[in-house]
Image (tube, rainbow, N blue to C red):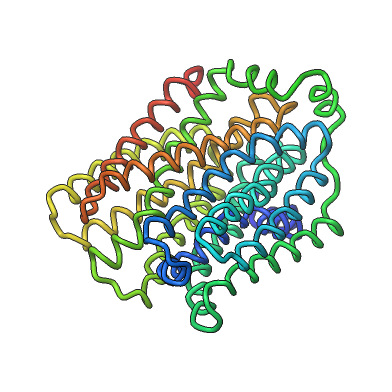
Amino acid sequence: MNSRTDEVRTPWGLVLLLGALTAFAPMSIDMYLPSLPSIAENLRASAAQAQGTVAAFLAGMAVGQFFYGPASDRLGRRGPILFGIVVYIAASAACALSTSIEMLTISRFVQALGGCAGGVVVRAVVRDRFDHTETARMLSLLTLVMGLAPVLAPMLGGLLLAIGGWRLNFWLLAGFGLACGLATLIWLKESRSEETAAQAASESPLRAYFALLSQPRLVGYALAGALNGATLFTYISASPDLLIGTYGIAPAHFGWVFGANAAAVIGASQVNRLLLRRRTPDQVLARASAVAFLVSIALTLAAVTGFGERWSVLPLLFVVLASYGFMQGNTMAGALNVDPRRAGSISALMGGASFGVGALAASLAGLLHDGTPRPMAIVMMLALAGSAASLRLLALRRQT
């Protein structure tokens, strides 16, 4: 397939809309990171309590997906997305109006419950319309659109903080949700197949999840993707203290370094899209998981010994995070291909596992925090070892 044909066949309008719907999580997390100290001061809370609002959002993302996935199989794709967006808008306004850290924490949890609808249903929409390899390529394209959020969001958040304070971040997120809701209402067509609807009507959501968890290949893809994604969550939670506190990078420059690592994910996802013209998603996964694990060993050695300090840790971290761009779209496509009739439930299972494992990994790195990059690097290495093992022992067992 040449690039010209690829451009003609790529539905760019759909890519932009679906990419925006998957951007709720990175927008909602990354944009307000520069505001955490200001939030703690304004609401008379500790730094740990302010950081807890991030954990509350991750928990909401993990929990909410398990509801929207089966709902999208049973009720259709459009309705659950629109419902989630309405919840997201209302919760974003509640965040902006919060008068205590407890109110903000609860509002962030509810905000995530609404915001996760877009991500989980979008993946099912993609599988409705495309085959295995094209699903992987489309998900790589969505990463390109979604990936702009962590590049731009921290810088935008810092600007909004300077202009109107931390509350302005949440008013902008409410506006973003409104725009996405209107676009979905006008342009997104229903894509759920009759076969999917019939399958969902014949079983309860709990039975669907049990059926999926009984399939080793799907479990392998889910664990491989979630454990690889744990590196990104660990980095997000550790990056402010690592970059500003440990390496002395000025807060004004934090967004640039943070954005550079986000660019690694975007770039890798587009290289992945090109590789899929000549390789299968499983072939790319096998190589990417092995390389990621090997680089994580080098990162851990650099972090533990202190050799090179930032000049060794940050470049190796860049490569480790880039593996996310190769792993996520391909593990999702592989999982969705195992049982396309339950695409919504699979998407929810994958997304819930990703946020759940990511939150646990980030919490573990936080508990081990010692002012050095060692805890972050060790957690990443263990996660990537588990990712590679899950892939080879479960997901790709029949191909090896």
Quadrant (top left, top right, bottom left, bottom right) of the C terminus:
top left
Identify which residue, 236 or 327, lies in the foreground.
Answer: 236
Residue 160, image x, y percentages: 54, 78
Asked whether, in this view, residue 373 is left or right of residue 159, the answer is left
Up the image or down, 395 lies above or below 50; here it is: above
Query: Of residues 227 and 105, which is closer to you in this image?
Result: 105
Asked where in the image residue 40 lies, by quadrant, the reply is: bottom left
x and y percentages locating residue 246 in the rendered image: 23, 63
Q: Height in image: 126 above or below 24? A: above
Q: Residue furthest bottom?
A: 163
Q: Residue at x 53, y 24 (%)?
A: 219
The answer to whether 112 appears left or right of 305 in the picture is: right
Looking at the image, residue 103 sits to the left or right of residue 206; the answer is: left
Where does residue 148 sit, x and y in percent of width and height?
A: 55, 64
User: Residue 252, how many percent across, how many down?
Assistant: 38, 78
At x 82%, y 46%, the residue is 78
Q: Residue shown at 37%/70% (left/top)?
A: 254
- Relative side of 247 to 203, left or right: left
Q: How many marks?
A: 0
Residue drawn 65% across the image and 52% down it: 115
Query: In which quarter of the view is residue 85 placed?
Result: bottom right
